Image (cartoon, rainbow, N blue to C red):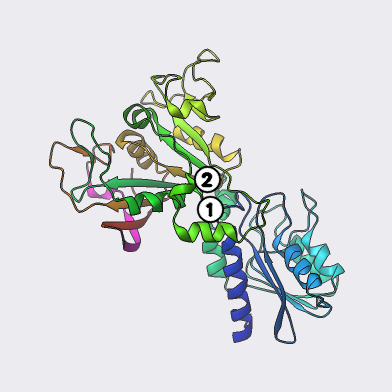
Amino acid sequence: MSFSPADYSFMAQALKLAERGRYTARPNPMVGCVLVKDAQVIGSGWHQQAGQPHAEINALTAAATAGHDVTGATAYVTLEPCSHQGRTGPCADALIHAKVAKVIVAMQDPFAAVSGAGIARLQNAGITVEIGCLEAAATHLNRHFLYRATEHRPWVTVKLGMSLDGKIALENGHSQWITSAAARRDVQAYRAQYDAILTGADTVLADDPSMNVRSAELPQHVLQTLAQQNTDITLKQPACFIVDSKQRLSTHAKIMRSTSTVFGVNTVPSDSYGLAHFQQVSQSATGQCDLEQVLDWIARIPANAVWVEAGPQLVGALLDANLVNELIIYQAPIILGANAQSAFGIKTLDSLTQSIQLSTQSVTTVGTDIKHVLLVQKDRTH
């Protein structure tokens, strides 16, 4: 299907609006909508938070507030309008009731149970529907949401801060701070985008982290995005999860003072982890927590994506199990030497065909550090 330059321009505006929900819409997808009549934008909106009005409703409301008649307008929507009754009403019905003439959709809903239903409802009402305008950009924007919809497991991003020679701590365990303050602010921005944070007992014992989003440390561009939401929309803290296969943690850790979840392989007394919830999972062949089961459990909260900040053993185990989608590495311009702790505790390889292949997405500088964003190739030989 061919689209005009104007179609691409208006859909690009809708995608830019959708991005405003990056820190608040989760676990729902980011969606934007632009209403156009006589080549002019008469209303626009985005989905701000789960349970709140969807992008189409906000755009229709904006048009009505400005005194515009939507009859005969074209709606540019970054994701297929919903056709089911959830916490909010069907957006397809709202567009039909508003008497729009055409709906241009960037991409269909990925969930098989509802995919195409909204489009069919619009078409049955006599509305022209065109699909695929800037589809690649829309897909990339909601890749976490799409991954869980198709793979039934959350997208996993591993964050690492390391030296130029690939070390994360000195031999004595000292690691604060290898990377710059700018890198740490960047990490706060990432945490704010994810439904869940996963760490391990080694990290909790070594650093006693809080593993939360600290508003005072968020970069300015994140604060500006949050300021664009309605006053009742707030940043939701990601759920926190800890892998503690050997039950080494106690109630004294900061992370146990919150409603986090600890995974282990043996049953424990209900008060063993303070306010934290304990969840037993199966034991892997190596005697550790079954990480596939851990991720399956996290997906049900629901979580589209998991941000991992952990030591070499948990990171290595996730990589060995082929459960990592993305690596974000902050590399500081320092060298820690051969005896320092390596970032990756993966198993010993016998052949280069077993190596973990990565695809570089970007290399930038953050403060004094080099930031690598890499995707993990899923077709390696075990």
Choose top left, top right, bottom left or bottom right for residue 95.
bottom right
Residue at 44% across, 56% down: 219
Few, some or many C-alpha atoms within 10 Å of disc 2 (few <14, some 14-19, many ≥20)? Answer: many
Secondary structure at badge 1 equals helix
Q: Is residue 262 magenta?
A: no
In the picture, measured across the screen, residue 187 lies left or right of residue 238, that is left
Residue 170 to residue 28: above or below: above
Q: Nearer the viewer, residue 221 or 325?
A: 221
Q: Quadrant of the N terminus?
A: bottom right
Residue at 20% across, 51% down: 164
Secondary structure at badge 2 equals loop
Q: Quadrant of the C terminus?
A: top left
Few, some or many C-alpha atoms within 10 Å of disc 1 (few <14, some 14-19, many ≥20)? Answer: many
Query: What span is in magenta?
Result: 351-367
Distance, label 2 to label 1, CA atoms, is 7 Å
Mark 2 belongs to which amino acid?
A: Pro
- The answer to whether mark 2 and mark 1 are in CB contact below 8 A is yes
Q: Which residue is mark 2?
A: 154
Q: Which residue is mark 1?
A: 144
Q: Residue furthest top?
A: 269
Mark 1 belongs to which amino acid?
A: His
Please indicate, yes or no, whether residue 11 appears anywhere in the rendered image. Answer: yes
Residue at 81% across, 75% down: 127
**Which of the marked residues, 2 or 1, is nearer the chain's N terminus?**
1
Which percent across, then down, holds residue 40?
A: 70, 84
In the picture, measured across the screen, residue 194 lies left or right of residue 25, that is left
Which percent across, then down, holds residue 125?
A: 86, 70
